[in-house]
Amino acid sequence: MARDTGSQCRICRRETEKLFLKGDRCYTEKCAVERRQYPPGQHGQRRGKLSDYGVQLREKQKVRKIYGVLEKQFRRYFHIAEKKKGVTGEVLLQLLETRMDNIVCRMGFAPNRNSARQLVTHGHFLVNGKKVNIPSCNLHVGDTVEVKEASREMDLIKDSLSKVEQRGIPSWIEVDFQNFKGKVLQIPAREEIQLPAQEQLIVELYSK
């Protein structure tokens, strides 16, 4: 499975805003965006104004990096969203939000999406009682996600759950922390998706 192995903090600095790619570190003074509020590189502090295309491209790259999706897969999500009923940009975000790795992260079982993706790939979760190890699979309303009993003592999961109040749980899912289980209550509306993005710019970019 291809993935981006570059610096996560560098990605946030490139967008000059927090994308919360490293989980708990992003809430502290160690966050790279807090310390250096300009893009990385030799000419980071002297970059000029972006063109309309540049603004659209940066918005697409930002959302793609937030969810840890490569370009080919992201474009596939867009084409699926185009064919569904509803606002294309909102449907695109809903498809990304209901990915298995994102929901594991949203439920608090992992500190960030990279960790969630690794945990899912290694088979630490059950969906509706069955083992699922595909991070990109989309969940549906009523699906339950549960940490395997043998994995509940993992330090990564326990540490993430101890700090879940800091990140918060979205209203479209519910979590039973005592039983290491969560449930998808509904497909999130745009206002329920905690994402600093202008999805219409992405639609305009791909519609050219």
Image: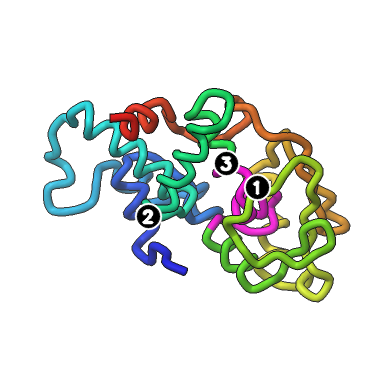
Q: Assess disc 1: are there few (<14), some (14-19) or many (≥20) residues with their C-alpha within 10 Å of its C-alpha.
A: many
Mark before the other along the chain sequence, 3 or 2: 2
Colour theme: rainbow
| For residue 39, side relative to residue 142 (left or right) | left
Residue at (40, 55) in percent of width and height:
70
Q: Is mark 2 on a helix, strand or loop?
A: helix
Q: Assess disc 2: are there few (<14), some (14-19) or many (≥20) residues with their C-alpha within 10 Å of its C-alpha.
A: some
Alpha carbon separation for disc pair 2 and 1: 20 Å
Alpha carbon separation for disc pair 3 and 2: 25 Å
Residue at (38, 42) in percent of width and height:
62
Mark 2, residue position: 9
| For residue 25, side relative to residue 85 (left or right) | left
Image quadrant occupied by the C terminus = top left
**Residue 31: x percent and y percent?**
42, 51
Mark 3, residue position: 95
Give above or below for 41 relative to 17: below
Tell whether position 168 is magenta.
no
Q: Is mark 1 on a helix, strand or loop?
A: helix
User: Residue 86 lies in what quarter of the image?
Assistant: top right
Residue at (34, 63) in percent of width and height:
6
Mark 1, residue position: 106
Tell whether position 107 is magenta.
yes
| For residue 196, side relative to residue 42 (left or right) | right
Q: Is label 2 or label 1 in front?
A: 1
**Residue 94: x percent and y percent?**
58, 37
**Residue 153: x percent and y percent?**
77, 72
Q: Is label 3 or label 1 in front?
A: 3
- Going by the numbered disc 3, the residue's amino acid type is Leu
Q: Give the range drawn in magenta.
A: 95-113
**Residue 91: x percent and y percent?**
55, 32
